[in-house]
Amino acid sequence: MTAQLELPTAAEEGLGAIRTLLKALRGELRDRGLAPMEAAEVVACGLAGHRDARLEDTSLDQLRDMTAETGGRSQVLALLYQEFLVAEARSGLGQYLTPVPVADLIADVLREPAPDDPLVLDPFCGAGILLDRFSLARPDSRLAGLEINRGVGAIAQALAQLGRRELDLRLVDSFESWATGQLPLADVVVTNPPFGSVASSINASDYATALPSALRAMKSPPAELLGLEVSVDSLVEGGLIAAVLPQSVLTNTGWSPYRRRLLSRLQLTGVVSLPEETFAPFRGVARACVIFGRKRSGGDGDRRPVPFFRSRSIGYDDTGRASGTESDLAEASACVRGLSELEWSLAADESGVVHIPPSIRWRDGETVRLGDIADVFAGRTPPRADYVDNGPFLLKVGNLRGSFVSWADRTRSRISEDMFARNPRLHLRRGDIAMTAAAHRPRYVGRKVDLIYEVPSCGAMPSAEVIVIRLRADAPVEPEELLFHLRSPVGYQQIQDLVRGSTAHLYAKDVVELRVPGSPSPQLAEAVRLYREAAGIHLRAVRAEQAALEAAGLTHDGEPGGGSDRRESPQATATRRE
């Protein structure tokens, strides 16, 4: 039995033509002096039948006709948001648009358990796409939304009018309504709370009394947790919720106290992890998920297994255009609704830590928490004044190759002896494992993992974009075995599930929670032997290459050498040392 998820039906070529027309309208209104928010409001209201002298009727009629032809009002309003407001909404409001396929997933999962004539609320309404798609699945719904920004609210109201739906839209600050006890209560909450910044007109101190102790204990409670708290408080007892959130809400170890409280109030019924491309066209969060749940009065927390689905395709690429790979969100809906065999589940432990299951198993056997057998630390990037021409080496992501570490000099690759001496804990050792911890895209984090077989005699330490894992003397596995795991599909996926932020970052305090092999593998003994043999061959080849370059009067980077000011490469110092 399969889910009946109805994905957008508008033809890709039709939406492409609409995108082109919207770009032209944006340029036309910009030339007339309208700010992006104002211009978006003019177009949205025009689509809903409210004419504006600043927009030519012919352009608006053409857009309205194209919208009718495609039958995709939500898609058109999403494109309007994308073309006019992405940068302003993300940086100024902490908002990022919910893509239509994700809104349809939410509607499909909640449409049957929702009660008759449900009051459906989005406390952070934005463009209203979540409410619109839910109303398509459940026409008997009563819709309500809270939105702080009038221009964005105009898009939501226009979307409701285009669909001939009644929307009770309140232009209020959701956080202020929450702090003053004026939140409406709903049977169903569908929401995509602000991320990265708090879109509020009041100071944090004004809503501090409304915060639970787990949030008050944080120096600066993140917007996504505040938004989630508002959303749960908006539910009646037994009410349903679907929230689009950064996946770090589940995996951030520092948020475990709040997560314990959340799970005592919310019975999770499913989690869908979304692919990286989901919010890329809208410059949103890099790693996102959808959590589904039902409000309850309290308890010791939710320890039971929760259906978990890892989506691998959203149906479009980073630009929002069709990728050629069919979306798998219908399968996600079937998983959460219990219509397909459950492959993966998750649950929080007593400390509130949630371990995201890998997509495939690496091998059978005992696993241990990485922090129990290894020390994990991030490096440090020095101020510009601490870079020198000749000194200890700074290991950067560019020196990691996913093969063997390259100690070739790069731009600003040496640091002062003073800087090196100030950070003894970061001094690299033979046997350390180094991996990418920061990148402009999540997929690159953890992509390159290297085992350090040799450290230059001048010394070396990692930069802040590198995380180092150092097995303890009594660790049950060899460094090579841990390296093989981290490079495996399962290990890489484990690392990916820990990535945080709208840009991609990995933190040592999260990495220590990884579950890794806890016993030697006889099957890997030969692989370890061969890898060590390969490492020896690599080191000999590097030294032979360096000797050849020196004989030719060249430095390692190919520049003419010779003279007393030539910088010696790490390979040369290692060779000379031996």
Image: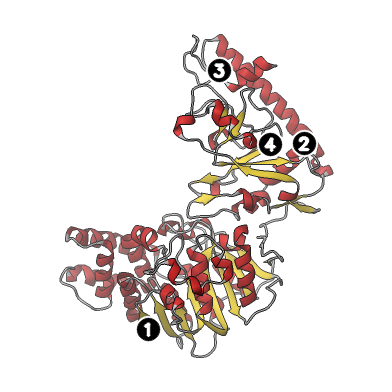
Q: Relative to the observer, which residue lies in front, 404 or 18? A: 404
Scheme of image coloration: secondary structure
Pointer 2: what residue? 528
Q: CA distance from mark 4 to mark 3?
A: 24 Å
**Residue 570 at what x, y percent from top left?**
60, 22
Q: Is residue 98 visible?
A: no
**Which amino acid lies under the numbered mark 3 shown in the image of this protein?**
Glu
Q: CA distance from mark 1 to mark 4?
A: 59 Å
**Which amino acid lies under the numbered mark 4 shown in the image of this protein?**
Asp
Asked whether the residues under the numbered discs 3 and 2 touch, taking CB atoms below 8 Å apart as contact, a structural biologist would say no
> Which SS class for mark 2?
helix
Q: Quadrant of residue 82?
A: bottom left
Asked whether the residues under the numbered discs 2 and 1 touch, taking CB atoms below 8 Å apart as contact, a structural biologist would say no
- Considering only order in the chain, which callout, 2 or 3, is on the residue closer to the N terminus? 2
Q: CA distance from mark 2 to mark 4?
A: 15 Å
Pointer 1: what residue? 168
- Considering only order in the chain, which callout, 4 or 1, is on the residue closer to the N terminus? 1
Asked whether the residues under the numbered discs 1 and 4 touch, taking CB atoms below 8 Å apart as contact, a structural biologist would say no
Q: Relative to the observer, which residue lies in front, 261 or 44? A: 261
Asked whether the residues under the numbered discs 4 and 3 touch, taking CB atoms below 8 Å apart as contact, a structural biologist would say no
Q: Is residue 530 left or right of residue 224?
A: right
Pointer 4: what residue? 432
Q: Is residue 147 above or below residue 87?
A: below
Q: CA distance from mark 3 to mark 1?
A: 71 Å
Exactly how many numbered labels are in the figure? 4
Pointer 3: what residue? 568
